[in-house]
Image: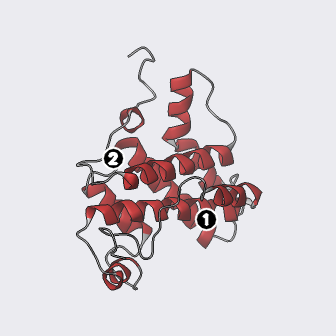
Amino acid sequence: MAKKKNEPALHKPISLPAALPIFREIEKSNDRAAGIVAVSFVENNLAVVLLKWLRPLSDKEQEDIFTRQNSLLNSFDAKIQMADVLGIISGNGLADLRRLKRIRNLFAHKMEARTFENAEIKAECERLFFPRFIAWAMEIEPEKNLRKRFEDTAHQLAARFDMEASKEKPPGPASQTAYDFWSPDMKHDV
């Protein structure tokens, strides 16, 4: 059977119901594991979107671009930068994506970063736009639980990338949402 345009060899889109075991794993894990697994889920779905924007690639080319040491899109940071310059994500979504990357890196590389109450992780979670946007849109108080703020943002971005990846052809640029341009200073009736 012929492979479709950039049908992922390495990065498979993870959407419902396949994502449910990942959600359960995140819910049952300690903070450190949840922080790492949730962002890996987001990174995977971002890689799938990036594949949609590239010319058809062989499995070897995908491996060369995404997995080899020092390859073009091996790191999460490189994927984020590429998504930015291609217009796949911008504004608050881009800022939150970068915050999730920092949170994952803190959990992965700092031994003292064991929980969402770690000062650096807490500061990043408090800066996430998505929980504040939802509170504004629903006219409710923002979520206070740091882990919940983090998980909600990770799930939203993973779902957004899954939605973009499911489109037949790449949008140009990606669909923008109110979340991308929302500001805490905005009036609700705007």
Relative side of 103 to 180, left or right: right
Counting from the top left corner in percent of width and height, residue 35 is at: 63, 60
Counting from the top left corner in percent of width and height, residue 144 is at: 67, 36
Question: Which image quarter is the N terminus in?
Answer: bottom left
Q: Name the residue located 60 percent from the left edge and 49 percent from the top edge.
A: 150
**Which quarter of the figure has residue 114?**
bottom right
Q: Indicate the amino acid at tag 1.
A: Ile
Rendered view: 25 above or below 139: below
> Callout 2: helix, strand or loop?
loop
Furthest residue in direction top, as rendered? 189
Q: CA distance from mark 1 to mark 2?
A: 23 Å
Rendered view: 150 above or below 46: above
Counting from the top left corner in percent of width and height, residue 131 is at: 56, 37
Residue on which the image places disc 1 = 36
Q: Earlier in the sequence, mark 1 or mark 2?
A: 1
Mark drawn on residue 93: none
Q: Residues within 10 Å of mark 1 (few under 14, many from 20)?
A: some
Q: Residues within 10 Å of mark 2 (few under 14, many from 20)?
A: many
Q: Name the residue located 52 percent from the left edge and 43 percent from the top edge.
A: 128
Q: Is residue 37 visible?
A: yes
Q: Indicate the amino acid at tag 2.
A: Ser
Counting from the top left corner in percent of width and height, residue 76 is at: 43, 67
Rendered view: 184 above or below 63: above
Mark drawn on residue 90: 2
Q: Is residue 113 visible?
A: no
Relative side of 183 to 42, left or right: left
Q: Name the residue located 32 percent from the left edge and 68 percent from the top edge.
A: 4
